[in-house]
């Protein structure tokens, strides 16, 4: 559980600001009918359909093979899940920004606000419920992934609770996979219990998405 929590913290701290910033740029500031922007948008949409194990292979080749980051630590797991979560956050954030009425932008610009002020003072706050909902759903999807984490070696036996993102750890989906493959009958109960804990995590994250969406909608 602690390994899953640390991995999700790394994923959130990396994927949310970079993904939202990319969505804001592509939707509000990127030039229209530009070849490079079109290529980036096509690649983002294609990445959303890539199997998760491909991101595990990418993390194995780049983060471990090229940069030498140790295996089986929350840092490497968070980096891989960040790559996998990027397309979901960018696409959902862009959809939320598109849903803001054009009259909001026109009114702010008509009163003398700059384009940057219009975006960050009016458009982004109005789109924040959709942005947060897409982000939390993307994080919940990443929490249930097993294949990319198996590729980066988060299957080691962990004797102690990890204290930080650089300590050896594993995550709940990988632990469920390992226990389900054990022939002893005692592991059937452990597997069932771990699945219930993971489902509890997912339910809490989805409830959090609903609560935050309603909270920001009331503020707006």
Image (cartoon, rainbow, N blue to C red):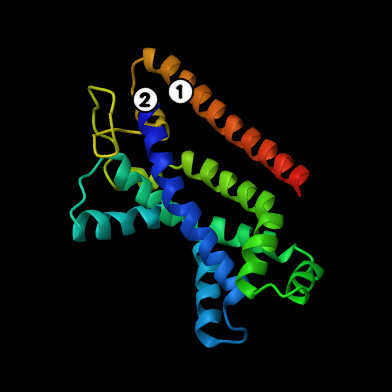
User: Alpha-carbon neighbours of circle 2 within 10 Å: few (<14), some, or many (≥20)?
Assistant: some
What residue is drawn where x is 52% and y is 66%? 22
Q: Is residue 137 above or below residue 205?
A: below
User: Alpha-carbon neighbours of circle 1 within 10 Å: few (<14), some, or many (≥20)?
Assistant: some
What residue is drawn where x is 69% and y is 36%? 211
Mark 2 vs 1, N-terminal side: 2
Measured as percent of width and height from the top left, residue 38 is found at 56, 80
On-image quarter of the N terminus: top left
| Residue 45 falls left or right of residue 114 | left
> Which of the two marks, 2 or 1, is nearer to us in this view?
1
Measured as percent of width and height from the top left, residue 24 is found at 58, 66
Residue extending furthest toward the front: 112
Quadrant housing residue 32? bottom right
Measured as percent of width and height from the top left, residue 137 is found at 59, 45
C-alpha separation, residue under disc 2 versus residue under disc 1: 9 Å
Q: Nearer the viewer, residue 138 or 210?
A: 210
| Residue 165 falls left or right of residue 13 | left
What residue is drawn where x is 57% and y is 49%? 135
Identify the residue position indicated by label 1 in the image: 194
Q: Is residue 155 above or below residue 95?
A: above
Residue 85 in view: no
Q: Is residue 180 above or below residue 149?
A: above
Secondary structure under badge 2?
A: helix
Q: Is residue 188 above or below residue 101?
A: above
| Residue 142 falls left or right of residue 31 | left
| Residue 210 falls left or right of residue 61 | right
Identify the residue position indicated by label 2 in the image: 179
What residue is drawn where x is 37% and y is 28%? 2
Measured as percent of width and height from the top left, residue 165 is found at 29, 38
Secondary structure under badge 1?
A: helix
Q: Do labels 2 and 1 touch, CB within 8 Å?
A: yes
Residue 36 in view: yes
């Amino acid at each position: 559980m602690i390994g899953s929590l640390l991995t999700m913290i790394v994923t959130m701290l990396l994927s949310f600001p970079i993904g939202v910033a990319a969505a804001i740029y592509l939707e509000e500031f990127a030039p229209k009918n530009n070849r490079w922007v079109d290529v980036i948008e096509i690649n983002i949409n294609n990445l959303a359909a890539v199997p998760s194990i491909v991101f595990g292979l990418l993390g194995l080749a780049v983060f471990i093979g090229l940069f030498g980051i140790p295996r089986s630590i929350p840092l490497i797991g968070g980096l891989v899940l960040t790559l996998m979560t990027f397309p979901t956050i960018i696409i959902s954030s862009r959809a939320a920004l598109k849903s803001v009425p054009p009259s909001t932008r026109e009114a702010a610009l008509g009163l003398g606000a700059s384009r940057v002020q219009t975006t960050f003072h009016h458009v982004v706050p109005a789109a924040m419920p959709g942005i947060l909902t897409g982000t939390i759903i993307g994080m919940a999807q990443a929490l249930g992934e097993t294949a990319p984490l198996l590729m980066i070696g988060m299957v080691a036996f962990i004797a102690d609770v990890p204290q930080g993102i650089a300590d050896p750890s594993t995550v709940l989906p990988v632990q469920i996979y390992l226990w389900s493959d054990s022939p002893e009958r005692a592991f059937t109960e452990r597997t069932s219990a771990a699945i219930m804990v993971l489902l509890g995590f997912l339910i809490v994250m989805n409830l959090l998405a609903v609560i935050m969406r309603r909270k920001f909608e009331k503020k707006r």
